[in-house]
Structure formats: C-alpha cells, structure tokens
Image (cartoon, grey):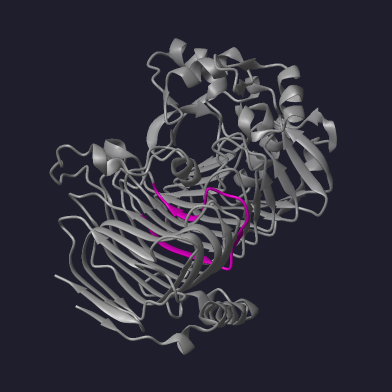
C-alpha cells in the first residue's frame, strides 16, 4: 500500500537540524569528563569495575643500570636487568628520563610500571637479528613471528605510563605499495635497498620478506620446518606490543608509533585499561592497525587518539577452527571518547571473531576521514557469534566508504578497495547455499543510536549471508549525507527509527532479500524519484513509514 503524505515544510533544513541536534548531544557528553566509576553507571550489561594496578614504592631509573639515552648505545641489556631486578624485589616503577633510548626487545614482568618522562623517546632497533622467532598468536591463529619490541606473557600488574614515545622502526620492516607513494617517495624507497616483486609495484625490505609474501595466507606463511620458518623470517613482522594472558594492565598517556605490523595486541588478557594514548602509523602502513584487542575480558579504551594505516580500534577472538577451539570471546569492553583520523575502520569487529564478541559499549567518538566508520566483517568458515553491541553518539565526516558496514563476504581488502574493485556483489557466486554449521558466523542484537555523518560514499551497506542473515540491527536517530543511499542485503529484523538520509544520487534505501524490516520516520530531501527500492524473492514483511508515503510489503 502506498499513501501520499507530502510534508514539504518538514523537509526544510531537516539534515542540518538533525546534524546540529546530534552534534550538540555528543558535545555535551564530551564536556563532562567521566570518572572511571561513571563509566559503569548506565552500561546495558553487567561488568565489574576495573581498577588501575597499584605498584610498590620502589623506584629506580634506567640509567642506574647503565642505560645511555644518546640514540646510539644499544640498551637492550640495561632494560632486561632493570626489569628483572624490580620484579624480583616485588615490583615498583622504572623511570625512563628524557633522551633517545635505542634498544632491542623489552620483556615486561609482573608488578612493573615502565614510566616515561616528558622527552623520553624509546626507539627500537631496526636490526632484524635482534628479534628471534617466537611462538605466538597472529591473525587469530597459532603461528610464529619475530619477537615483539614490547611483550609480556602471564604477567600480573603491568603498566606503561607517562609522556614518552615508543617508536617501533616499522618502516624498516613493512612492505610498501607503489600506488600509495608519490613518484619521488617511490624512487627514494627503491634506491634505499630492498627488492621489488615481479610486478614491480611493491617494495620489500629483503628477499626473505618477499619469499614469505609469496607463500602466505593473510600474512601467515605455510611454513612447517624450522628451516622453512627461518627462510621467511624477515616477512614475519612483529606486532609492536604483544601482551599474552596478562592481568591488570595499564597503558596510559604515551605515544605508540611506527609499528612493524599491528601496533597494540593484547591477547587473552583480563582487566586492561588503555587511557589517553596516541597510536600512530603512516596511512600507507601495511597491516598498520592501531589496537587489536583479541579474546580479552574487561577492557576500557578511554580518550585515545588513533591515526593509522589499517583498522583503528578492532575487537577480535581468533580465526576459524583455531579460534573456535580456543573458545575465548572478547567481552565486556567499553570504548569512550576516542578520536580516529585515518584508518580502514574507526571501530571494527572482525574479521577474526570465531571465539565470539559480546557485551561492548562504544560512545562519544569521532571518526574523521576513516575509510569506514563502524565496521563489522567476517566470512564463511569463521563461525562465532557477535552480539550485544551498543553504540551511541558517534560523529563522522569524510568517510569514503560507509559510516556503517556489515560485510560477511570479507576477502581481505579494505572496504574502500573492495568498493573500487567492485568486489561487493559476491552473492551472485552463491550457486549452492551452504547449510548452517559451526563455521557460519552470526552477527545479531546490535544497537546504534545518535550518529551523524557528513560526507560518505554510501549511507550504509549490509551484506549478510543467505544462510545466516545479519539479525536484529537497530538504528535510531541517524543523519547521513552520502553519494549513495543505504543498501541492505540478506538482513532480518532491522529497525530504523528517525533516520534521515541525503543521497546525491539513486534511491534512499535499497533492500534485497530483507525480511521483517521496520522503518519509522524515514526522511530524505524532496524530489527524489523512486526513493525506495525493494527486490529479491525472499524480501517480505517490510514496513516503511515516511512523512510522504508509507510502504508495506508482505
């Protein structure tokens, strides 16, 4: 049934008014600096309060153990000795004063606070020989990588605090694509050494790095013997900070930058606080993620700034069979007051989510120029359930792809690359729909409220699986201007309330094989021809209420 209800007066200034109201709501929230206790008051799930670790009064300086901050002296031995000494004495704080502290890997131990003073710059060695191969978890699977510049395993009460900078010398490790540099930058990089691939469009730091790339699946090579691993060692770029099975962790105030691979990777940790961090990588940094929080329980990510080469704030829980067998979800996570500049996604879940992700609250964040704002991604084979995600007051500008993306056909590319390469219509390749098994990923019960985006490639993109639709996504009070409107495929139980979309061209919303959708007060500018497009033989029970006309499809 289609019923005309023209309300042109209502339309005047609708986008600007909605954007202003939502923006003011976020600004008011940002001006009220919450105490840690305030974070838990209105959480939609139960979560125990996380306390910052407390350290004994014992205090030493790194210089007491022979360290020299001249940018030349290698201080690996001094760091190891001071950390061992403090830990053996029951714990305390290690002061790193102003200076350039050149070092190999740092291994943290229980009850140690590495406190950096203003002007402290810790620069990690670019000599690959300083980083032996170790067993670890990367890309959601058990594998081998070079030892991380900063690591801890099984530690309790550990912290990195202060005003210092940790630089991972990642430019020595990372491959670089020609298309991401200017002509002059590319000439200088090639002239510096290294090797090119056969297509001459990607630079690698060594033959070993190039060899590893030729035989890798999502950055994990198919090596079996020690000799095979050693032959591709340079390809096995370490994440900069790798904390495994640690408890009571605090990262506060410092800058982490220029990581060889991911920047921060807490894995299977409990009670972790990341507060007022700056996390940086060049925009072209291959796998230059900001934070990959994997299979962790009870985490606060508060007031942090990200400007990175891949996903910024990303929640993970293992990949495929490896992740399902491990069975450790990422749960009880609060993200508040963070700003993301460049990144493939501002807030991201997946694609490695086989152990599940649940009970997550994200609020009062700004995404400025990220490829995607809110990014949920997975694929067949992963399994796992993502549920109970609550997102409020997110403001975005200049988002080249989508402010809101669900993609269950993820193939390893950024959303922008997939859009440019026209890789998105992968359902056409589904000749036979597989049955639902433990390998089928599920995304459901996600609540998004009070979001605004000025300038996007497409308002929304939902790309679910026919055998397991994206389910129960609720969007309320959203205002989005984009080149194209919203596009929803294989989705069930979506609700839209007070959603205003301003597309430069095409329909406001396109629905394909969408079931049980209700849109209440869907608005858009006047004069759009055919604003609503419904297709797909499985589309049913669609109810759309606008100020201009109503649509009901059964």
Residue 235 in the image: state x and y as whole percent: 54, 23
Q: Residue at x 15, y 46 (%)?
A: 436
Q: In this picture, which residue range is highlighted in magenta?
A: 330-350
Residue 34 appears in the rendering: no
Q: Is residue 203 visible?
A: yes
The answer to which quarter of the image holds residue 547 is bottom left
Q: Quadrant of the N terminus?
A: bottom left
Is 138 inside the magenta-drawn segment? no
- Quarter of the picture containing the C terminus is bottom left
Residue 12 position (above or below residue 475): below
- Compared to residue 334, the image places residue 163 above or below, namely above
Q: Residue 107, image x and y in percent? A: 60, 38
The image quarter in which residue 438 lies: top left
Labels in figure, total: 0
Task: State the image coordinates of residue 507 (x, y, percent, origin top left).
Answer: 38, 63
Q: Tell which of 219 and 502 is nearer to you.
A: 502
Left/right of residue 552 with respect to residue 346 in the rendered view: left
Q: Which residue does the image show at 74% across and 29% down from the upper left? A: 185
Q: Residue at x 70, y 37 (%)?
A: 79
Q: Is residue 547 above or below residue 99?
A: below
* Horizontal arrangement in the rendering, residue 457 relative to residue 531 (left or right): right
């Amino acid at each position: 049934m289609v019923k005309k209800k023209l309300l042109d007066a209502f339309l005047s200034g609708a986008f600007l008014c909605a954007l202003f109201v939502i923006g003011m709501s976020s600004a008011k929230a940002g001006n009220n600096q919450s105490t840690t206790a305030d974070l838990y008051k209105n959480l939609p799930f139960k979560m125990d309060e996380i306390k910052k670790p407390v350290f004994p009064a014992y205090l030493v300086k790194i210089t007491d153990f022979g360290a020299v901050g001249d940018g030349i002296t290698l201080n690996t031995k001094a760091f190891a000795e001071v950390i061992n000494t403090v830990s053996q004495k029951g714990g305390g704080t290690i002061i790193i004063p102003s200076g350039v502290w050149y070092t190999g890997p740092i291994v943290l131990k229980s009850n140690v606070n590495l406190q950096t003073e203003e002007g402290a710059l810790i620069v990690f060695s670019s000599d690959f020989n300083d980083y032996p191969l170790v067993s670890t978890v990367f890309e959601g699977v058990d594998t081998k990588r070079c030892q991380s510049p900063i690591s801890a395993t099984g530690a309790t009460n550990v912290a990195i605090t202060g005003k210092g900078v940790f630089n991972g010398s990642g430019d020595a490790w990372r491959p670089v694509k020609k298309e991401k540099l200017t002509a002059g930058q590319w000439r200088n990089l090639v002239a510096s050494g290294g090797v090119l691939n056969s297509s001459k469009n990607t630079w690698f730091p060594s033959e070993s790095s190039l060899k590893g790339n030729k035989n890798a699946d999502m950055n994990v090579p198919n090596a079996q013997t020690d000799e095979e691993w050693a032959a591709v060692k340079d390809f096995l770029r370490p994440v900069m900070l790798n904390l495994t099975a640690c408890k009571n962790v605090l990262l506060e105030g410092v800058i982490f930058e220029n990581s060889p691979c991911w920047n921060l990777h807490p894995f299977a940790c409990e009670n972790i606080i990341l507060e007022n961090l700056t996390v940086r990588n060049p925009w072209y940094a291959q796998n230059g993620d900001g934070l990959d929080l994997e299979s962790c329980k009870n985490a606060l990510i508060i007031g942090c700034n990200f400007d990175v080469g891949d996903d910024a704030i990303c929640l993970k829980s293992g990949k495929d069979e490896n992740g399902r067998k491990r069975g450790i979800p990422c749960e009880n996570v609060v993200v508040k007051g963070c700003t993301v500049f460049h990144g493939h996604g501002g807030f991201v879940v997946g694609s490695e989510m086989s152990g599940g992700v649940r009970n997550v609250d994200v609020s009062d964040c700004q995404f400025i120029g990220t490829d995607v704002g809110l990014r949920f991604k997975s694929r067949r084979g992963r399994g796992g359930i993502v549920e109970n995600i609550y997102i409020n007051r997110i403001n975005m500008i200049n988002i080249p792809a989508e402010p809101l993306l669900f993609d269950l056909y993820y193939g390893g590319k950024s959303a922008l690359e997939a859009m440019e390469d026209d890789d998105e219509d992968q359902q056409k390749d589904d000749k036979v729909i597989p049955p639902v098994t433990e390998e089928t990923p599920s995304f459901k019960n996600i609540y998004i409220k009070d979001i605004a985006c000025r300038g996007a490639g497409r308002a929304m993109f939902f790309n679910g699986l026919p055998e397991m639709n994206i389910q129960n996504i609720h969007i309320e009070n959203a205002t989005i201007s984009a080149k194209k409107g919203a596009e929803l495929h294989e989705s069930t139980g979506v609700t839209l309330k007070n959603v205003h979309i301003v597309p430069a061209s095409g329909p406001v919303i396109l629905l394909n094989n969408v079931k049980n959708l209700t849109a209440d007060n869907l608005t858009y500018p006047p004069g759009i021809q055919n604003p609503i497009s419904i297709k797909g033989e499985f589309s049913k029970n669609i109810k759309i209420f606008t100020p201009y006309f109503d649509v009901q499809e059964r």
